[in-house]
Every structure is written in structure tokens, then in C-alpha cells.
Amino acid sequence: IAAFVISSVMVAQPPKENRIPMLGEPAPTFTAMTTQGEITFPLDYLGKWKILFSHPADFTPVCSTEILDLAEMANEFGELNTQLVVLSTDGLNSHLDWIKSLEGIQKDDGKEVGIDFPLVPDVGLKISSQYGMIHPGMSTTNTIRGVFIISPEDQICAMFFYPNTTGRNLEEIKR
């Protein structure tokens, strides 16, 4: 019976390609066509801090608010030698249309927001699986609301996961 229980537990493990990278491990590498052209992440940003955000879906209220807040804080992150990259399982055309719908929206200070960081499409779930951002208890087709902070040497330094209904505190992430 013990062997059966051990065997059952082993079968229940998530597939290796959907394993969440651990602290101190190298950030998984991917190449993708983004809203700002092709990138190879994290290699294109070697020597910079990188923050990889995932969101469940374009055109949703919480995600839209977060992207606008990220855009508003992009210069602050830049001053900290930090590159922002956003990912979801939506397609490139959806990302482009979403950016177009958001740009020009005025924030509290009356300034229009521009989105000057890449949005990465992951329709095939390959990147999401590399980073362990598909959590079947939440969705089998959409990423969770996640954050990976990656060092200038391309190692995972911190990671956070949030319920899809809860927006992230960007000031805390910047800290």
C-alpha cells in the first residue's frame, strides 16, 4: 500500500515544463515577437534588473489598471536600471489593440500614458509553462497574475503570485 501511495503522489506532480523556477536559478530563456519587436528574454537585458509580469487577459479591468499603472511608473523603474516585460496568453494582435485602446488615457495628473515596454504573446503556453504561470486550479489557458524579479545576472531573485481578482501593489514591487 505504501508503494501505491508514493506512486500516486509522484504521478500527481506537475509536468517538469510547468515547474516554477526557484530562487537563485537562471531565468528561463525565450525568444518571442512582442509589441516592440522580437526579444530574447532575459538575454537582451543582461546587466539590468528585469521584472516579468503575467496577467490573465487583455481588455479586463484589473489588468488594464495594472498596465496603466506600470506605464505611469516605467520611468521610475528605468531609473532603477529595470526593464519591464509583460506576458499573457493573448495573441500579439490582441496586445496591440489593447495598447491602442489604453494609450492616450489620462491619469490623475492629467498626463497621457504611453506603454513603452514589450507585451509578450504566449498563445501556445510555452513561456507560461517555463515560468510555472499556468495554475490549473485557476485556469488551464490563462496565466495567473504573477511577478518575477530577475537580477542583472539573469537569476530569479523574487516571485509573487496573486489571485486573478487582485491587482498588484506596484510600489511594493518597486521597493
Image (cartoon, grey):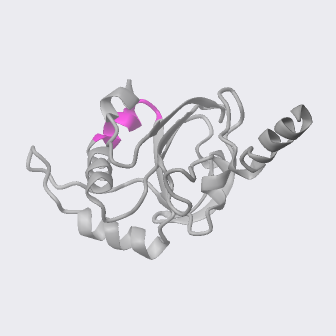
Q: Quadrant of residue 167?
A: top left
Q: Quadrant of residue 63?
A: bottom left
Q: Main secondary structure of the magenta part?
A: helix
Q: Is residue 4 left or right of residue 57?
A: right
Q: Quadrant of the C terminus?
A: top left
Q: Please provide the residue range marked out in magenta.
A: 73-81
Total number of numbered discs in the rendering:
0
Q: Please tell me whether residue 78 belongs to the stretch shown in magenta.
A: yes
Q: Is residue 175 above or below residue 43?
A: above
Residue 111 in the image: state x and y as whole percent: 13, 51
Residue 2 in the image: state x and y as whole percent: 88, 32
Q: Quadrant of residue 115?
A: bottom left
Q: Is residue 127 left or right of residue 34?
A: right
Q: Quadrant of the N terminus?
A: top right
Residue 62 in the image: state x and y as whole percent: 28, 52
Residue 104 in the image: state x and y as whole percent: 18, 62
